[in-house]
Amino acid sequence: MQTTMRKSQTSAAIAADNASVESMATMSAPSNLHGFDLVKEEFVPEYNAKGFLFKHKKTGAEVMSLSNDDENKSFGVTFRTPPANSTGIPHILEHSVLCGSRKYPIKEPFVELIKGSLNTFLNAMTYPDRTCYPVASCNLADFYNLVDVYLDAVFHPKCIENERTFEQEGWHYELNDKDEDLTYKGVVFNEMKGVYSSPDSVLARECQQALFPENTYGVDSGGSPEVIPELTFAEFKDFHGKFYHPSNARLWFYGDDDVENRLKLLSGFLDEFDAKDVDSSIASQAFFKEPKRVVKTYASGEDEEAQKCFVQINWLLNDKPFDQETALAVGFLDNLLLGSSASPLRLALEESGLGEAIVGFGLEDELRQPSFAIGMKGVEEADIPKVEKLIYDTMEKIATEGFTDDAIEASINSIEFSLRENNTGRFPRGLSMMLRSLSAWLYEGDPFEPLRYEEPLKHLKSRISSSEDVFRPLMRRMFLENTHRVTVELKPDQKLGEIEANEEKMKLSAKKASLSSEEIEHVVAETAALKLLQETPDSPEALKCIPALALSDIPKTAKEIPSDVGSIGSTELLTHDLFTNDIIYAEHLLDMKTIPEDLLPLVPLWTRALGRMGTSKRNFIEFDQIINAQTGGISVSPFVSPIRGDPNAISAYMVFRGKATSDKAGIMHDLMTEMLFDSKLDDQKIFKQLVLETRSGMESRVQGAGHSIAASRLEAQDSVAGWVNEQMGGLDQLEYLRKLAKRVDEDWDSVVADLETIRKCVSSRNNSITNLTGDSKTLDLSLSSAEKFLGSLNQSAPASSANAWKTINPAINELLTVPTTVNYVGKAANLYKSGYELNGSSYVINKLLGTTWLWDRVRVSGGAYGGFSDFDSHSGMFTYLSYRDPNLLKTLDNYDGTVEFLRNLHVDEDELTKSIIGTIGEIDSYQLPDAKGYTSLMRHLLKITPEERQERREQILGTTNKSFNDFAGALEAVRAPSAKVSAVCSAEAAEKAKSERPDLDFQMKRVI
Ligand SMILES: [Zn+2]
């Protein structure tokens, strides 16, 4: 074994860590409180954080201030905003307050921040009972800029004075010409139409409303499209006046910045308000005496296959938030019932053959009253009672027999592992803590309580180990003896989509008929006025109000991730020496170019089948439990990407990923070996279920994320790598799954043979790569077991390695039809093929397009929920995409207009600087250690050297106005007739587009 690892100062790092724990614990409150009272101070060892709860003297606004050494600083302001109806007021207001404020009187300060800030998080969220405005950044000046803009937005928004924002974000009548049909437009209106085009969302809404018929959770805070047009501007304005007040605010600060500065900044906003009595309390839903049943319908497709039902059982668990130990116990119970596919409730449903996939989120504990839900989708109507009976019977059995010790041990380990890892992915850790804290704080509870888990966990574990019966009584109390239970059935209705569309049309034509010709002229004039306003950019002078960083604030050199390239036997080895709290992150990449082309669509199913039928050593439940008891998880997935510079070069690997504490690295690798070589692949019934589940997931994706389907279609026409990904995760995959479901029934032996072929193809050590992330001690402890895993592989090249992938899909314009009320429109071309050479400025330009031209045309005036472009620097594909879009051909025109927009664009100095900073912020984005290790691996695979990254960075920093004008030339390729269109839309929208643009020769394909 040969490695080239660096030795580093692990022990010093740990010592430094301990020192900072001590200094945090003894940290005292600031001496100047700037008009706040200190209510409570506590050290939270779970997060090495010193916390203070302050109360603003004048208004009563509450502030949680947490300090630790996390550079990813976060802030949030949250208001309780319980709605009284389903007009979507809180949601429309959430969008609207970000459209200009007293100090920042421009159209969309939010968009300016997206353009030119180093934020690591910037968004706003509407819950059923609250509206939350969180931001995060690692750069102190940037962080305070974000906080300032957000505070001004919520307390002094322009949208309550000027009705235009309400019209744009909420709803308005659109009439471009007096002879046209009247239509509704509005960003939230379309966003929600898109949401409820998916039956899964309809089910979630019906369940929540059925469970809470009497309190605020019984209405739709997001807005029901048929009710949104009932909302008036006066109500909208009142809602802001009532709830967006410091006396109803909960503010949060977290990170390594100064506590006193936080208070000073806040008092600058809060001091001008007086205390106000805000009644925003969330009433409790009283418990039902008897269980209930609700039957609803959803708009389905016409196929026989599409006529499937949903059934979900929902329980209300408590009249208020749980205390911390009960919360933890119920969290365990949730994990034991549903946490992994071997958990008994999930397993019983998945193996029942009664439906395609599980629905229901299990435990929901973020609202005032916790609840639990479980059910199935893709169920035959006659089987609905069987699904219910199965759920109750399984629960009864668990309540009688209890869980096995192995199951409990696996559950405890997986929960403890995730607490130790505290891996919130791209979501900042401080904001994840804020959301946790709010689960008590929002309902008059102690904001510190949900942050503590060590003591209650210790206590719960000792109760479990003293063989106290913790879970069986909980099962009875929470589920079996609980009469607050609602069963919701959702049934298909082929006519519903048409009926609803007709109702909307009739409402609109009745409205138009009721208008006098002057009034009609007025609507036309208003439509034009709104469009003009939307399409007129802010002046450069006006934009100067947004605080911005200077280019000098940006590091000139790219930050490198520690990475050593060596070898371990014949395998290439990458190691990343990073502090990971004693966790080893391992990726083993096995060459998958050895898989024959015709088996590629089977690859995703193969990865899901691994371990799912058990291994030759143990059954599935035992296998799953040992993984959860000993590791932080093991997964397998394919990775396929083009490599820039060579149109035929593809990087394609089967990636085995695992994480564990360093003392468990050995067993983790043994389990990987067992998974690859000893997994059974011959259980027909289980495999059929996996096929149906995967198919159902794909169908939901077509309706809910049609833009990703369209993008994949376009890539499959352009490159072999794109085609391979389409086989494994696009529409071609869906079509393959539909045939596969039949083949499993009719020719199972040939399916098993294919699965075994895939195993044989990827079991070779030939061309393998290993990637390990951890500090040097953890790396040292893990190397020998990684070597053992690699040693178990076939040491010679596989026989079938001569396969070469070469297919791509024919280039056509496509309309993919599904039952929906919104469109997803894509258009793309490969810029490299028309001679464009990659320059870093393209990143800046692409980002600017998404916040200017495309944002303004496709979203703001077009009324789509989203519109953006994507430039894949590896393949050269430039793709325009829209999301939940009311338009189709008009959106294509807007895409084509990008060329002229760029050609005539004059970006002034400030705007340019902002765009550059925003782009650098994106490429420098904050990552947790496991993500850093993985990113570094990707760069290695795609042959991106540090030198090239530095060159790209300099090109970004050197972007000029001319770069924008020149890029117009490159984008001609996406305007040219050779560029291709792919859209997911309704059959009606497709017919219309086809007849209006015969030149595009659209091919129509019914998907659902
Ligand atoms: Zn929204």
Image: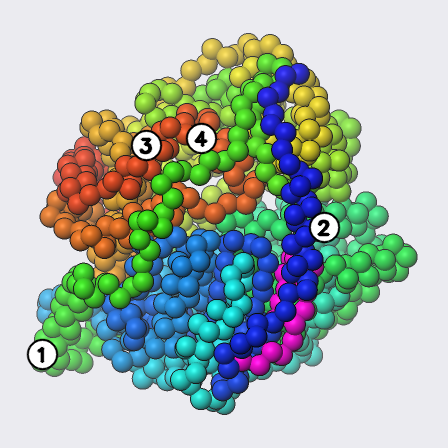
Residue that extends furthest to the right in the rendered view of this protein: 466
Viewer can see residue 709: no
Left or right of 4? Residue 226 is left
Q: Write down the region rendered in magenta.
A: 36-52
Provide the residue designation for mark 2: 416
- Could you tell whether 125 is left or right of 771 in the image? left
Q: Earlier in the sequence, mark 2 or mark 4?
A: 2
Residue carrying label 3? 951
Question: Counting other residues with Cα less than 10 Å from the Cα at mark 3, is it few (<14), some (14-19), or many (20 or more)?
Answer: some
Q: Nearer the viewer, residue 415 or 527?
A: 415
731 above or below 594? below
3D distance between C-alphas at marks 4 and 1: 63 Å
| Residue 568, horizontal then vertical, whole percent | 62, 18
Instruction: Single out the mark in the foreground, 4 or 1.
Output: 4
Give neighbour class at mark 4: few <14, some 14-19, many 20+ (Cα, 10 Å): few
Residue sitting at x 46%, y 14%: 803
Label 2 sits on a secondary structure element that is: helix
Q: How far, Cα to Cα, is label 4 from label 3? A: 15 Å
Crowdedness near tag 1: few (<14), some (14–19) or many (≥20) residues, C-alpha within 10 Å: few
The residue that disc 1 covers is: 517
Out of 963 and 224, give the one closest to the viewer. Answer: 963
Residue flagged by tag 4: what amino acid is it? Answer: Arg
Separation of disc 2 and disc 4 at Cα? 32 Å
Circle 4: element type: helix
Q: Quadrant of residue 371?
A: bottom right
* Mark 1 in CB contact with mark 2 (< 8 angstroms): no
Residue in the image at 18% along x and 75% along y: 512
- Cα–Cα gap, marks 1 and 2: 69 Å
